[in-house]
Image (spheres, rainbow, N blue to C red):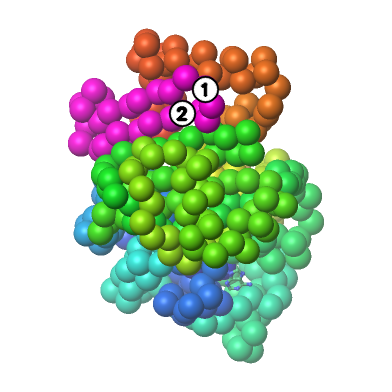
Amino acid sequence: MDIAIVGAGMAGTTLALALSQRTNYKVALIEAFEPKAQSHPGFDARAIALAQGSVQSLSKLNLWSTLAPMAKAIEHIQVSDRGHMGQVWMHADEHLVDALGQVIELERAGPALFAKLADTEVQLFCPDTLARCEQQQESVHLTLNSGAELSAKLVVGADGGRSPLLASMPFEPQRHDYGQTAIISNLETSKPGTTAFERFTDQGPIALLPMTEDRYSLVWVCDRNKADVVMAMDDAAFIEALQQEFGYRCGQILRAGKRHHYPLFRTHLSRPFHHRVVFVGNAAQSLHPIAGQGFNLGLRDAVTLAECLASAQGADPGLFTLLDDYWQQRQPDVNTTLGLTHGLVKLFSNNNPFLQLGRNMGLLAMDLAPTLGQGLIRQTMGQHHQRSATW
Ligand SMILES: Cc1cc2nc3c(=O)[nH]c(=O)nc-3n(C[C@H](O)[C@H](O)[C@H](O)COP(=O)(O)OP(=O)(O)OC[C@H]3O[C@@H](n4cnc5c(N)ncnc54)[C@H](O)[C@@H]3O)c2cc1C
């Protein structure tokens, strides 16, 4: 085996598909859960916003046509601060694009992408779990829970934010616990639409993303104690509390689906590879969902790694120089996105009146002088990465 990918969430699956299209390397993909398993940790109830740059990357890999029928376009974005005047609007037509981004549901999108692996040469080990990983001079030896053994020149850890592979290796990830929880739920409201809303409250942001079938996907971030209370509410109390925090931008909240919750933390590696093992996606870095950048960043990891491997076709895929080249290309984007996301959390989860005034004036200024918002919208749309992407 040339390359073994551990974990077939969104990052591992797209990487396997990209490698099968662009390289001749023999690829194995190991995943603990069947794609439609109830408790799949990667393909769960989350709906995520894809930046336009991600949609373009997926199109170049011929994967967007699989996702498009289940995607909802974001045509407008409104950002506001609870209790203050400042707000900013962004509109797709002002940026001469059809959409500012697209929203997909992981429990539909993930299995659809995973199904495409059947048309490839990728060797699937699913359901199976990596039990042991032994780095040797010329290869890495993997033992799976089923008893299967394989040897690969390169192992890619795409096994998520709590990566067991990373934990078994000599890495020291930097970890920051935000002390916050994200609660998600699908909503039916009296005013469905194509606007994504982000509203900052003194506890954390509330985001509503437009979804197919005239629904909204909610991400409500609050501190852990409040999250426990919100999770314990019955539906009527939950809807009332949310309506009070969020207001009536989408009209009245008529129904709320099952709630799920995610503790929020940031992890980051100063260098995500070590002797024939490299990490991508959430295994390499986990972000706060405030700016919806997690998978957008993980997809750029997968695309860049596949590009590096395509350029090296025929060479040993686990060479230090190749992995170092990959990281040289990824480091600026990863550091910028981590820094911007962390900065936003700090700026918007703070009751300091000077910070409140500053961010409120910032939002007002961006709405009055749209060019000031260009940097933000470029980040949201993933445009700054298009120059380097060749596919
Ligand atoms: C509330 C919330 C909202 C979000 N919103 C957005 C958004 O709007 N936009 C965006 O881009 N991102 C968003 N994200 C982030 C995004 O969901 C993640 O970045 C992305 O889904 C992570 O994908 P992954 O493949 O890297 O990891 P995962 O989805 O965690 O996949 C890891 C896979 O590895 C498997 N695995 C683990 N260990 C083993 C093992 N030992 N053997 C075999 N398999 C193993 C697991 O079963 C799993 O399938 C959001 C996240 C949250 C929590």
**Residue type beneath disc 1:** His
Mark 1 — residue? 84
Residue 360, image x and y in percent? 53, 18
Q: Quadrant of residue 89?
A: top left
Residue 111, image x and y in percent? 37, 70
Mark 2 — residue? 80
**Res 282 visible:** no
Q: Nearer the viewer, residue 24 or 69?
A: 69
- Please, is residue 122 above or below residue 212 in the view? below
Question: Left or right: 275 with respect to 185?
Answer: right
Q: Residue at x 24, y 23 (%)?
A: 94
- Please, is residue 318 above or below residue 53 in the view? below
Residue 245, image x and y in percent? 52, 41
Question: Left or right: 97 with respect to 120?
Answer: left
Q: Residue at x 60, y 15 (%)?
A: 357
Are the residues tagged 1 and 2 within 8 Å (C-beta)?
A: yes
Q: Nearer the viewer, residue 221 or 314?
A: 221
Q: Nearer the viewer, residue 83 or 347?
A: 83
Q: Could you tell me which secondary element the residue under label 1 belongs to?
A: loop
Residue 324, image x and y in percent? 60, 43
| Quadrant containing the C terminus in the rendered view | top left
Magenta extent:
75-102
